[in-house]
Amino acid sequence: MGSVIPPEVIEEIKSRSDIVEVIGSFVQLKRAGSAGYKGLCPFHQEKTPSFHVDGSRQMFHCFGCGKGGDVVRFIMDKESLTFVDALHMLASRAGVVIPEYAGSGDREAARARGSQRERLLALNEAMAAFFSENLRRDPRSPAALYLRGRGLSIEDAMRFRIGAAPEGWTGGLEFARSRGFTDAEMLSAGLARQKEDSGRCYDQFRGRLTFAIANEHGRICGFSARSLEAKPADGGKYINTPETPVFHKGSLLYGLAAARKAIAECGHAILCEGQMDTIAFHRAGVDCAVAPLGTAFTPEQAKILRRYTSRLLLAFDSDGAGRKAVERAAEILLPLSMDVRVIAIPGGKDPDELFSTGGAEAVRGLAGTARPLISVLVSRLQGKFDLKTPVGRGEAAAWIAGFLKRVENRVELEGYAAEAAEALSVSVEAIYSELAGQRRLDRRREGFTPETRREPVPALRTEAPGVYPAALLSLLELAVNSSDAARRIAELVDPGELASKDPVTEALNTVLAAAVNGEFDEGIGEVRDALTERPVPEISRILIEHTPCPDMERAVSDSVAEFRRIRARDKKKELMTKLRNASSVEEKMALLKAISQLA
Ligand SMILES: [Zn+2]
């Protein structure tokens, strides 16, 4: 994901992400003016709306805290994402596919890193083919028999890139060498290990069923391998590729590359416990299913899914471990404001078993049975606690509050608190007071004071006096609101007078040049886009205000005159300082002359 996204793809993502629609899914917006909307700012606390969204200029600006920019900037700030990650999130929302390898950059180191990554990915791809071939070759191998026992044909195995690692110690290494890969590459791809004493290399996966793991872009980057013995001598039931430059277990999801399109289409993702369940869903034609890699679901994986959808259905086993897994997932997902639902699988089965007994139809019906997460947790209270006694109800309230305290959206929290209160036959106030108590305790435990825990509220910035001269800001304001004004300013002002490198002057130069070339609107777009990387409250304010100007000619000449006066004053100050420090007579004379010309 560190890859460069080509400019035309960025353009496509932006053009398919209407800012009013995108922000509207985070903030309740009301119409204000022809193409404008406003709402309560998501970046600072306020009671009256000062957060404006402009459909015509595709930008936002908050008059309270000064945050502003385009749709990408909004997602970066709202979700605390980098530019590239924000684009990925918008792309999946808009159904735009980002090609993985584009523009390698020109730095030698980056290229070397890229080519090492590329080698490791190629090696993984080759090994996946090798494992598949190994599985196909012997239909009576333990791996083939196991698969058949699970109702998977050899075609299914090929489709899901399932294979078999050979018995013995060096089958994989020998194959890799025959394809021109070195033992060092096998080691850094995590496909081989090295004996400490002799330095000899041997295969990481031996006599196991292998599941190829693809990254988000469908490139194979590692394996998860299941033992075919009851008591595996070489580690657990499943062993994975260790961490490598291309394989980071905690941020990979099994099946995601195949699920991306389906997630965008159906608006949700299904999270299962493991590979076999994911495969059962995909075989049933439910392609939006993914799973963590044999470990607990991580916050990192949650954030990846959040880029694709805000609705997640959990399809975990209904046994004790599955219930625990739902509760753990709840702790991670609730703070992300995701709409989480829980699928109940009939007969206490897992999706894989359901596929074997009920077929594709039964698996396809599962999504429809999903219930809201908090409701599911509330319904567990009855079985977990003795709700007939006050003590039992108190314990139950404490347990459910442990989840509710992670819900950050006030509106959602209110609904859930009411649900919990009803289930426990207590007042909503009782639930809130339990919540407040737990939060206090958490703060004390973590050693945080409320001040350091809260995100810093940005200081109120409106005019930013002193940073940019008012005359410069009014020139920009005139220029962005009328191409005639922009052309007039370009006639009156010398390029040399606008040579300073601050963002406001740069924005003004961009608009003036665009207006002169008959590309006024493109120029405005360029100024807005520059705010993505470098937000400047003064500029986003000016862009969103659309200040009308009744007497353009006069306003332009007044502003130009004022701008020159300010510039002359600053220049004079600068020369006076130089004069004080000048050593030679010639230098002093020259400076005096320059000063007299300014006045
Ligand atoms: Zn604000």
Image (cartoon, grey):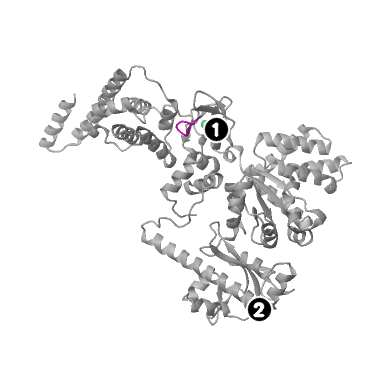
Is residue 172 located in the magenta-colored stretch of the structure? Answer: no
Q: Which residues are magenta?
A: 53-60
Q: Residue 444 in the image: state x and y as whole percent.
A: 66, 43
Q: Is the residue at mark 1 in contact range of ligand 1, meaning its CB lies under 8 Å from it?
A: yes
View extreme (left): residue: 586
- Residue at figure coordinates x 38%, y 38% from the top left: 526
Q: Is residue 501 left or right of residue 48?
A: left
Q: Is residue 384 left or right of residue 407?
A: right
Q: Residue 357 in the image: state x and y as whole percent.
A: 79, 61
Q: From mark 2 to mark 1, how far is it between C-alphas? A: 64 Å
Which residue position holds label 2?
A: 138
Instruction: Give neighbour class at mark 1: few <14, some 14-19, many 20+ (Cα, 10 Å).
Output: some
- Residue at figure coordinates x 79%, y 41% from the top left: 397
Is residue 59 located in the magenta-colored stretch of the structure? Answer: yes
Q: Residue 223 in the image: state x and y as whole percent.
A: 60, 67
Closer to the eye: label 2 or 1? 2
Q: Is residue 289 left or right of residue 434?
A: left
Q: Secondary structure at mark 1?
A: loop
Q: Is residue 1 shown above or below 15?
A: below
Amino acid tagged 2: Asp
Q: Are marks 2 and 1 in contact (CB under 8 Å)?
A: no
Q: Residue 28 in the image: state x and y as whole percent.
A: 59, 31
| Mark seen at residue 44 | 1
For residue 184, say whether it is visible: yes
Amino acid tagged 1: His
